[in-house]
Amino acid sequence: MNPNGNTSYGQMPPPPPYAGGQSMSQQMPQTSAFAVNRPYGQPVMGNVYASPPQMGSLGTPHMPRWNRSPSGSHDGRGSWKGGSHVGSNGSSAPGISAIPPLDPDVVLTLVPTRPLLKALAKECRPLPPWCVGFAPAQTLSEELFMFASFLRHTPEEQMRWTSLVATIDAAFREVWPNSVVAEMGTTAAGILMAKDTTAQFYALNTEDTPELRSKFLASANSFGFQVDFTTDYRLMSCVTLTEARTGERSFIRFGKDAAQCAIAAEVLKTSIAEVPARKYALVAIDALLRQNKVIDDIGSNLALLNGEAVALMLLSIANSYSKDDEPDAGRLLVDFFLTFGFPVHFDCAAHSVSYKGMDPPSPKTHLDAQLSVLDSIDGERNLTPKLEKFSHIQAVFHYCYTAISQFTQVSSSQRRAQSALSTVIGGESYWSRVLSMFHQGIAPFAQAVRDRQHILAQHM
C-alpha cells in the first residue's frame, strides 16, 4: 500500500516517450507476430480458420425530428448543409442559423455521446483506440505493450487511486489501529483499477466478530463507502466497499485468516507484475474476459471465473517454458489460448492447473469441479470449486487462438480487423477513454483528438 503516490508493484512504470507516428518497434525487440511454444505448444488448427470477427458498432440513438414550421416548409426530413438545418425543399428550419467557423486554436469540450464516439472511431480508422497517435503495431507483443500502456493510470487517475487507498486505510484503522492494508489478487498482479474493475486488498492485524463488523460499518459509512460483507472463493471473511460518489469498488479480505493472502500476493507480484511480458498478456486476457462477461473480479460469485485463478492459469503457461526460453507477451498470450482453448492440450476432466507449470500437467485433484485451479497458498484447495460453463470459456479461448492466427497468416488486404488484438477485444468501449485522455492532455491521444475536434463537434 503506497498512499504517498509512489510507484507500487501494481503500477506500471511510464513507457519511454514516443513521437507521433513513430513505431514502438524502434523501442522494443523485434519478435515474430505469431509464434507458439515449441515443443510445449503446437498449433493444431493448420489452415482451418473460424469465421472472421465481426466489427462492432457504437450505434446512433434515434433522435427526435425537428418540429414542422408553421408554414409547413420544413417536412422533418432535413439535414445539415453548410452549417444550417435545411429541409428537403432547401429552406432553413425556423430559428436555426449557420454554425460560425470555429477557431482552430480553441480546445473544445467534447461530450462522449454515442454519435460523437462513433465519429471518433471513424476518423481514427484503421487504428484501434489504444494505437491512436502511434504508427500501427508491427507485432502482437508490441500491440500488447501499447494496450497495457493505454490502460495505465493517468495522473488524474493516480490521484484518485492514492486517495482511495488512503481512505480505505483510514477506515480500517478507526476499528483496528494496527491494521495494514495491502494489494492482492489481480491488483497485485498489475491490473490497475479502472471504471469497471474492482481493486483487491487484504487487511492484516484484523479480527472478525459481529461487534467489530458493526463498528467498521459505521466507520466506512462515515468515509462515504457503501458496505457489503461476504466471503470469497477461499471462504475468507471479506467486505466490499463501494465509494458512493464515484462508484469505485474495492474488495478486502480481513480477519485472522487474511495473513495467508500475503503468500498469494507475493507470488503474483514477483512472477507477473514484475515481469512485463506476463503482465501485458494478463491485462489483455482480463479485458477479454470482462467483455465476454465470464469473469467475476470481485471474487464472491463462485459460478464465474475469478481474476486470481486467471492469473495463476497464465502463470502455469509461463512456467512451462525452459529456463533459456523466455517468451514475449504475444507468444505467451497465444500459447495461453492454445492450451486452454483445446482439450487436446488441457483436459479439464483429467488435470488440475498448477501455477508451477503445465509440463507435465498435474493430475486432477478435485474431481467434482469443472475446473481445478490449485491455490498458491494451499495446493489442496481449488480456487474455482463451483465454476459453471467452463466449456463456454474454453470456446472463447478457442476462438481467440483461431482469430489471431488467421489475422497473422493472411495478407493485409484480406484482414477484416484493425489489428491482431482487435480481432478478440472490441474497441468500442475504449473510445471514451481516448476522449478522456484528450481532456487530460495525455499524449499522443490529446493531439490526435484535437486535430479532429472540429469534425467531432458536429456530432455533439
Image (cartoon, helix red, strand yellow):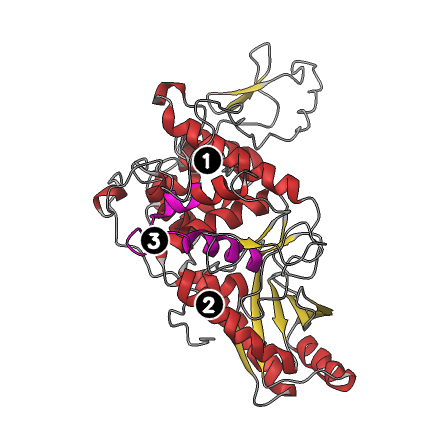
| Residue under numbered circle 2 | 267
Name the residue beneath numbered marker 3: 322
- Callout in the foreground (1, 3): 3
The span picked out in magenta is: 307-334
Amino acid found under the numbered disc labelled 3: Ser
Q: Magenta stretch: residue 315 in it?
A: yes
Residue tagged 1: 422
Earlier residue among tags 2 and 3: 2
115 to the left or right of 281: right
As shown in the figure, which amino acid type bears the numbered disc 1?
A: Ser
User: How far from the left and from the top, in percent, is residue 457?
Assistant: 47, 35
Question: Who comes first in sequence, dot 1 or dot 3?
Answer: 3
Return the x and y of residue 190 as percentages of the image width and height: 45, 61
Residue at 54%, 26% (x, y): give it: 54
SS label for mark 1: helix
Q: Are marks 1 and 3 in contact (CB under 8 Å)?
A: no
Position of residue 139 measured from the top left corner of the image (x, y, whole percent): 32, 38
